[in-house]
Image (cartoon, grey):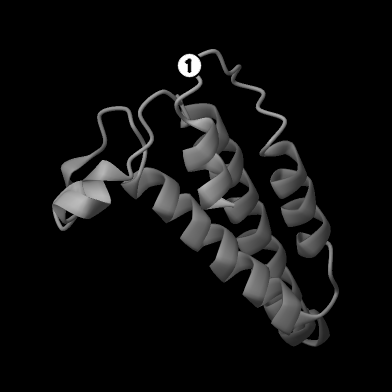
Amino acid sequence: FSGDLNWQDPSNGRSEDDPLLSPVLCTVDCGQRSHDMDVLSLWLVNTWRLFNLLRQYSGEKAEPEWTAGNTEKQNSHRLQSFDITPIREQLRLRVEECYQNLMKRAIEPILSPKI
């Protein structure tokens, strides 16, 4: 996935609705619909990791906390011509939704008998 982004990055004419990432977001949505707690946990962790990697390697002015530990080689891999802010926002929303679903499924069975 990240290799595809790096390969596509030099083409400056990409739109924000990148067809390269639409399948990724669709797959994340499908994974978050699982009824298995282990699968939900896995999707939450992996989506959160992808979100953080996009923050670390984004081309726009990234927050220093995400790039301070980068080596020169890592900084050379930062995306230069993509504005991935909308993509990160979509991933952030999916991470929050997955977390809420996971907590609901973990806590609701414990609290339901007591209510």
User: What residue is shown with label 1?
Assistant: 12
Q: Quadrant of residue 101?
A: bottom right
User: Which residue is pictured at 68% across the width and 36% down the height?
Assistant: 20
Q: Quick one: 3 or 86, which is closer to the camera?
A: 3
Q: Quadrant of residue 31?
A: bottom right
In the visual, does 90 lie left or right of 39? left
Q: Position of residue 67 (x, y in %)?
A: 21, 48
Q: Quick one: 99 or 62, which is closer to the camera?
A: 62
* Quadrant housing the C terminus: bottom right
Q: Is residue 111 visible?
A: no
Q: Position of residue 92 (x, y in %)?
A: 54, 45
Q: Would you place residue 85 above or below residue 30 in this image?
A: above
How many labels sit on residues? 1
Q: Amino acid at mark 1?
A: Asn
Q: Quick one: 63 or 112, which is closer to the camera?
A: 63
Q: Would you place residue 16 above or below residue 87 in this image?
A: above
In the visual, does 42 lie left or right of 74? right
